[in-house]
Amino acid sequence: MALLSMEEICRDIFRENQHRIKIKKEAVAVRNLVNIFHTTLKISNERGFQTMSLRDLSRVSGLSMGALYSYFSSKDELLEMIQNQGRRITLKVLARCVDPGDTPLIQLRGAIRAHLYLTEVMQPWFYFSYMEAKNLSREQRKKAIENELVTEEIFMRILEEGAQKGELEVDNPPLTAAVIKAMLQDWYLKRWKYSRREVSVQAYADFVIGFVESVVRKNSSN
Amino acid sequence: MALLSMEEICRDIFRENQHRIKIKKEAVAVRNLVNIFHTTLKISNERGFQTMSLRDLSRVSGLSMGALYSYFSSKDELLEMIQNQGRRITLKVLARCVDPGDTPLIQLRGAIRAHLYLTEVMQPWFYFSYMEAKNLSREQRKKAIENELVTEEIFMRILEEGAQKGELEVDNPPLTAAVIKAMLQDWYLKRWKYSRREVSVQAYADFVIGFVESVVRKNSSN
DNA sequence: AAAAATAAAACGAACGCTCGATATTTTTAT
DNA sequence: ATAAAAATATCGAGCGTTCGTTTTATTTTT
């Protein structure tokens, strides 16, 4: 799961945006992109993206204003780059963590664990995406909403397939998927609460799986 | 439930902050406070409190800059006033909606419905409080966190009482309360999603109650 | 020598906020 | 009842500051 290192992600970003980025050498660019994104997430998740000035970003990252503007052409573009990459990774990871060959119950468990472990590793990113969504442009906000709905649909399809096969008992798949999503998002939105209580991601995953299963499983045995 | 009119709330605010507010006449002050808060919530919930300039607020509310500053002494104080009042109302309403004489199961249903109906009526306020929490001063942020935990404790105590009396089966009251809270918060955080799907607050309340009960009730009958 | 980063200055625009001028309402005096 | 006076409320141009952004000449790294 942790194959998703910040370096790899930033290398992708660099290659895809090479026409915009003024820096030529990949090694240099990647190193600084990691720095820029890390610092942006750090400051923004404490005080908000709007409140973070580029002078703040310059000071904390150690890069000059001129250097920063070699990597993006505006503050809004920086916001978009972060959002874009986060979205792409979510879908990629979630899609490959659900094996259509498995039974719905196994798929459900896999999807819950995948969602929690992914958001655990990339908590700052998800927290940022959630909180800064309203600052996006209209088209970017539309993409963010789509993304939310797609993740939810993954759960809904599993539930529907389970109900159809008679393996699960779900009387309202859309709402069930919605509240599952709400429980999963709580993990990265209220991280302070769970770490204060020393709840590990494994413990939370087990709990949510148990909680959901006692609703959707036909017989409470095995 | 809708006894909590904006006018009443603003009258309370005016009386408690009369020393700060430069306006003498209650009727005038209340009228304008309603306008100011309503407009602030409207703009902030679309674009964020930080992004909203006081010139925006002036333009949309129809009050001049000078008039605005007769009601608060700084933008931060406006933020605090809104947060304070929202917190107070939450606790007041939730506390009086749970009758200790009822059985834990009835209390649980009452608390879920109370939470949902309250946040339905005051959705902009709750959405605002959630999203703008990071912009608060340290002491104000501490109060917001306390508030979150207190609401959660109401649910935890009901669950624990139910488990103790043998009426409910809850193996992890703190985590159960946490995910119940997550489901309830989803209602005001993702209002766009539920209204798009035409899910009413009653339907959502019934669903959540059914969902939770099929986990915590000992026998699935009656 | 080329590429990249730096420090510093400057730009106009927009920010939170103030304050003297003005308008409105209430009180007082006739 | 009405006009003058006082109190209250509103106005909006303008304050100093900071914002995002660009540019410059210079230094550092490869």
Image (spheres, coloured by chain):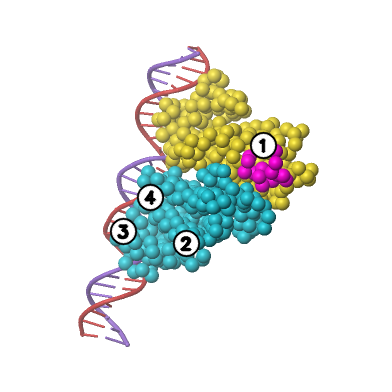
Chain colours: A yellow, B cyan, C red, D purple
**Disc 3 to disc 4, C-alpha distance:** 14 Å
Q: Chain of mark 2?
A: B
Residue under label 1 = A109
Residue under label 3 = B20
- As rendered, which of D4 and B85 lies closer to the eye? B85
**Disc 3 to disc 2, C-alpha distance:** 31 Å
Q: Chain of mark 1?
A: A
Q: Amino acid at mark 2?
A: Arg
- As rendered, which of D20 and A115 lies closer to the eye? A115
Location of the C terminus of chain B (image quadrant) = bottom right
**Disc 4 to disc 1, C-alpha distance:** 45 Å
Q: Chain of mark 3?
A: B
- Is residue A84 a member of the stretch shown in magenta? no
Residue under label 4 = B76
Residue at image position (66%, 47%) is A215
Q: Secondary structure at mark 3?
A: loop
**Disc 1 to disc 2, C-alpha distance:** 39 Å
Could you confirm whether marks 3 and 1 are on the same chain?
Answer: no
Mark closer to the chain start, 3 or 2? 3
Q: Chain of mark 4?
A: B
Q: Amino acid at mark 4?
A: Asp
- Percent coordinates x, y for residue A132 in the rendering: 52, 42
Asked if the residue under mark 1 is in contact with the one under mark 3, i.e. CB atoms within 8 Å, the reply is no
Crowd band around label 3 with a 10 angstrom C-alpha radius: few (<14), some (14–19), many (20+): few
